[in-house]
Image (spheres, helix red, strand yellow):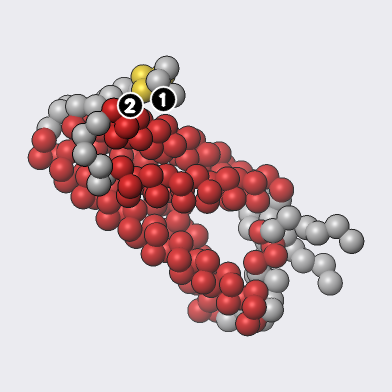
């Protein structure tokens, strides 16, 4: 049976961004609990570099998706699942753009310029403001927790389709096995 698949580029971007998000969120959760130290500052820089990289990759992914739409869902997929899938993917893209932006805005408002890989200074987008920095920090955290919940639901749905429905939806995003 032939499976309608995502392109190799779409798969590579999906798994690369997923791995980077997992690492970045994990580092983000860990670093916020550390006491002030050179190690904490190093982790914050790495986290910011990852955020900028994720943002760039997501923009590339969005551009790719415009010209290479997702393969169609199986005809047996109920309409409500099609709507949930479309909404989930849209929310993922919005979050993958909003989370790095809120991080960048938060850094600007807190007076910490983002210097990509310690070489390319990104412009501060806001004037320094303690109150706005705290608001953006809460927003950034909330968006990340929303992303975590959405990712758990996404993985659960993919596994349900693979192991219970056996409808090849998960295999569309996996590299093809050689015969």
Indicate the position of residue 64 as horizontal and vertical percent values. 61, 44
Quadrant assignment, res 47: top left
| Whether residue 53 is visible | yes
Q: Residue furthest right?
A: 179
**Is the residue 1 above or below the residue 30 in the image?**
below
Lateral position of residue 177 relative to residue 89, left or right: right
The numbered dot on residue 114 is 2
Label annotation for residue 116: 1
> Would residue 178 be found to the left or right of residue 50 on screen?
right
| Location of residue 131 (image quadrant) | top left
Residue drawn at point x = 37 percent, y = 41 percent: 100
Residue at 34%, 53% in the rendered image: 144
Residue sitting at x 70%, y 71%: 168
Which type of secondary structure does the marked residue at label 2 adopt? loop
How many angstroms separate mark 1 from mark 2 (CA)? 6 Å
* Image vertical order of residue 127 relative to residue 20, above or below: above
Q: Position of residue 173 (x, y in %)?
A: 66, 59
Q: Secondary structure at mark 1?
A: strand
Above or below — where is 82 with respect to 32?
below
Asked if the residue under mark 2 is in contact with the one under mark 1, i.e. CB atoms within 8 Å, the reply is yes
Q: Is residue 156 above or below residue 57?
A: below
- Judging depth in this view, the residue of 23 and 160 nearest the camera is 23
Q: Give me the residue at 44% from left, 24% from top.
A: 117
């Amino acid at each position: 049976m032939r499976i309608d698949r995502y392109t190799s580029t779409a798969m590579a971007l999906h798994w690369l961004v997923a791995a980077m998000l997992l690492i970045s969120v994990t580092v983000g959760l860990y670093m916020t609990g550390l006491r002030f130290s050179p190690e904490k500052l190093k982790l914050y820089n790495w986290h910011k570099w990852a955020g900028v990289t994720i943002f760039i990759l997501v923009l590339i992914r969005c551009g790719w998706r415009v010209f290479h739409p997702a393969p169609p869902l199986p005809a047996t997929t109920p309409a409500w699942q099609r709507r949930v899938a479309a909404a989930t993917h849209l929310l993922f893209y919005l979050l993958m753009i909003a989370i790095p932006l809120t991080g960048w805005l938060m850094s600007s408002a807190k007076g910490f310029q983002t210097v990509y890989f310690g070489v390319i200074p990104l412009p501060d987008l806001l004037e320094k403001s303690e109150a706005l920095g705290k608001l953006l920090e809460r927003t950034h955290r909330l968006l990340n927790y929303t992303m975590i919940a959405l990712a758990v639901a996404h993985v659960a749905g993919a596994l349900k389709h693979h192991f219970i429905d056996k409808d090849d939806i998960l295999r569309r995003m996996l590299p093809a096995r050689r015969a």
